[in-house]
Amino acid sequence: MGTNDNEESVFTPWEVRGKVDYQRLMKEFGTEPVNEKLLNRIKKHTSGSLHFMLRRGIFFTHRDMNWILDEYEKGNKFYLYTGRGPSDHTHIGHIVPWIFTKWLQEKFKTKFIFQLTDDEKYVFADKLEMEDTYSYALDNALDIIALGFDSKNTEILIDTDNAKTFYKIALPVAKRITYSTVKSSFGFDNSMNIGGIFYTSIQAVPAILESVRQGKNIPCLIPHAIDQDPHFRLARDVLPKLGYYKPANIQCKFVPALSGPDGKMSSSNPNETIFVTDDPKSIKKKINKYAFSGGRDTVSEHREKGGDPDIDVSFQWLKILFEPDDAKLNKIEEEYRSGEMLSGELKAILIEKMVKFLEDHQDAREKAKDKLDDFLVKD
Amino acid sequence: MGTNDNEESVFTPWEVRGKVDYQRLMKEFGTEPVNEKLLNRIKKHTSGSLHFMLRRGIFFTHRDMNWILDEYEKGNKFYLYTGRGPSDHTHIGHIVPWIFTKWLQEKFKTKFIFQLTDDEKYVFADKLEMEDTYSYALDNALDIIALGFDSKNTEILIDTDNAKTFYKIALPVAKRITYSTVKSSFGFDNSMNIGGIFYTSIQAVPAILESVRQGKNIPCLIPHAIDQDPHFRLARDVLPKLGYYKPANIQCKFVPALSGPDGKMSSSNPNETIFVTDDPKSIKKKINKYAFSGGRDTVSEHREKGGDPDIDVSFQWLKILFEPDDAKLNKIEEEYRSGEMLSGELKAILIEKMVKFLEDHQDAREKAKDKLDDFLVKD
């Protein structure tokens, strides 16, 4: 990846390390900004409302959203596709694109395909066995269901369970991708295993699955975090050679780790991460202990100079996920910036919001266990 | 492959060009010769008889046959596995290992798994579409059934139909094979497509399929033509890392093309090849017109100096496949070598034998159409 400009900075679908420069990624990947004009166009189809992740620039860049809307306006409705590599329990970073996808599904009344790439996580993670990634796939599926997607319009596919579907459709994609291409797209060297080399063709499949099934071209829109872009850039190169549309993308920023505002939350350090299965006590402890603060060193300094919400992880989490109400968020920002609100108070707001959110989620997650069969596709 | 010592000589699982030096391959691949001692040991389990392909050195080399017999004698019975890349109709070269496999199955009363690698042929052949390779897979399956394998002890798997089985079991294999390894094992360069790179892990699956199914280690013996050795050498490296036995191999020479005794029959030139679906008229025409002869330029020279059965393709075909009776074959060899038998007479014998063989095969092939479901495995 061209984005690695020094040894400490890594940016691939499997690892993000160092500060992420979103403007630079957009330029490098050749994506378009999500601008006012596009937002106004989307509004026409969403009863004038916009999801807060659009209003706040969390979904900040895209490819071919205007084409998706052109086709939609002509009556050629798109479907939605996103996914998850099940290497652990779901953390709060993962659900950002899912929540946005659910909004899109509701507003545009579209089909949604969710892919659980247990094969990917198995071949890319030294320490995971197939039983691990498969059991995380089933575990993570509960989180999708818990978010309230409509089972009639939503399908969850697990790569190894649905291998008959995936492998067959991946082969024509794989035939048109050389080792040279994956080497440069993903920064592989010759020690990469052949499962990892093949994998990107499996991730391309849901982008054409509805077209394959229905025997005609159907537009596909993929909401996803920006680190998955190399897969979909490749898919956009190859799929037209097979007679399919290029999938469109709308891409979001990362939820930062507890330790600082610049990178991406990762499961590898549990203290940096809130899992959707964490209990209130651990949530409170992790935030109070580890959440990077934009506050000042002393209360009096904070009162005088104010805090910096732009680098404060608690504020960022409220903005990205836990405080959808703009008026409330603005009030918090103002009070924190002025010094009226202290870091501890800001953390307390986040903890309350997050505990409520995750308690509801965990209830829904329990109920989801009975609904798995309504969502999982049988090959 | 180290066997390419000049530009005209190629030896990979996908292409064999130039003269094949079997002794050298054996040395290079590190396989053992099928010698008297081994043949005597096999005889103990086959009522004292040996298949003519063993007696005549058609199956000339092996790995771990003694281990297979050790285990067999201890009551740990092996199963058989071989396969076919369905790129065209079956030709007479393909059925040599199948006929031998059938003999092994009968003598040792073992299970037999036959793999049709339609995925392989699709990703390796520029001109073939998936519909082509899949329809050849079904077509080639008829030839296996026509040879008379017992449906109770024989399974035919098609890679794309059985992708759920194949992909899942291939992943742990693929995880342990790097690009460097396939590059050197198969002579790939970076323009190889990622489907071709991944493929060898799919070909390894039947070598452990019975062990996976039964949850315990079961020895596997693979009768196959020597060009497939790189796949199985790799499988033998990797499978023990997953806790499985190394598969054993017993390997045969090629049926030479009509044009000469040195290489391998290939489907790419129909005039070099007899397909098992050819009618008597084309068989007669191809042999009379194209079969490379070990005879002399004139009848009088032939009567005087005799023919050379060692380079005569008609004689070689009788030896490898169409004249199982040693006494009859020896008589033909003697008469041809002495000059008593002319090339035309030798060809007439081959034509008669072959037409009879293929007419019977084609009858059985018609009947096989009703038996497909008894052999094909549903995932």
Image: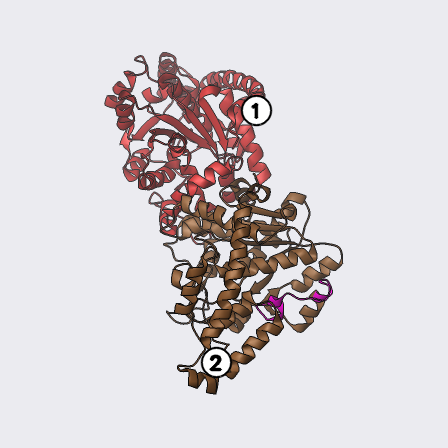
Chain colours: A brown, B red
Residue B377: percent from the left, percent from the top? Answer: 51, 29
Q: Which residues are magenta?
A: A43-59
Where is residue A193 shown, x and y percent of the image?
39, 50
From what the image shows, is residue A136 above or below residue A344?
above
Let me know if residue B183 appears in the view: yes
The mark lying in front, picked from 1 and 2, is 2
For the residue pair B204 and B367, the one nearer the viewer reads as B204
Chain designation of label 1: B
| Horizontal side of residue A232 vs A283, given as left or right | right
Callout 2 amino acid = Gly
Q: Amino acid at mark 1?
A: Ser
Residue matched to label 1: B282
Above or below: residue A236 compared with residue B270: below
For residue A22, which numbered disc appears in the image? none
Residue on which disc 2 sits: A307
A365 horizontally vs B219: left or right: right
Residue occupying the point 71% across, 62% down: A46
**Residue B92 magenta-drawn?**
no
The overriding secondary structure of the stretch rendered in magenta is loop
Asked if residue A55 is among those painted magenta in the image, a careful observer would answer yes
The 10 Å Cα crowd at callout 2, few under 14, some 14 to 19, many 20 or more, is many
Outermost residue toward the right in this view? A74
